[in-house]
Amino acid sequence: MEKLIQIIEDDERFELQPEDPDTGEKLGSRIFYRRVPQAERNRITRQHTTTKRNKRTGASGEVVDFEALGRDLIAYAALDWSGIVGGDGKEIPFDRALLQRLPDGILAQILDAVRTTSSREVADLGN
């Protein structure tokens, strides 16, 4: 199989089937997401980076709010979901505002998938 560079397309759609954080068992839910282009990753990172001065030494450095950065990367990348339910057991339609109401263990899996997929630059193409 030949490896080729794969461009990031606007209509990309990847699927994540999360695992139960406690048991590692695959869940019936699905999260659909896209890769985050480097320019967009840079923009989101800049949004959550501030310069702080150390009062004791006078030195300054950049500080990144990694929690906010992760939240916004997920919000950018997430496209849809299925099998996400409310407390009443009824499926809830996808809403970006509800992403942060997912359990922390699931959010970590989404962020990991987005970061891993976003760094992929080659595709295996069968000839």
Image (cartoon, grey):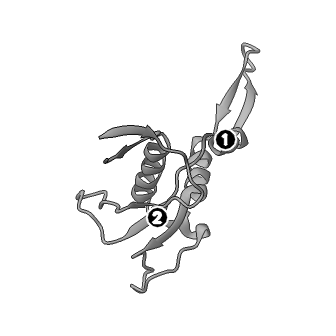
Residue holding disc 1: 39
Q: In this view, does 109 lie to the left or right of 10?
A: left
Q: In this orientation, which residue lies closer to the viewer: 11 or 110?
A: 11
Mark 1 element type: helix
Q: In this orientation, which residue lies closer to the viewer: 17 or 70?
A: 17
Residue for point 68% across, 42% down: 48
Q: In this view, does 18 lie above or below 98?
A: above
Dividing the picture into quadrants, the one containing residue 99 is bottom right
Residue for point 39% across, 68% down: 30
Q: Residue 57 carries which label?
A: none
The residues bearing labels 1 and 2 have C-alpha atoms spaced at a distance of 21 Å
Q: Residues within 10 Å of mark 2 (few under 14, many from 20)?
A: some
Q: In this orientation, which residue lies closer to the viewer: 47 or 124?
A: 124
Residue that extends furthest to the front in the rendered view of this protein: 127
Residue that extends furthest to the top in the rendered view of this protein: 57
Mark 2 element type: strand
Q: Earlier in the sequence, mark 1 or mark 2?
A: 2
Q: Is residue 1 left or right of residue 72?
A: left
Dividing the picture into quadrants, the one containing residue 53 is top right
Amino acid at circle 1: Ala
Residue holding disc 2: 32
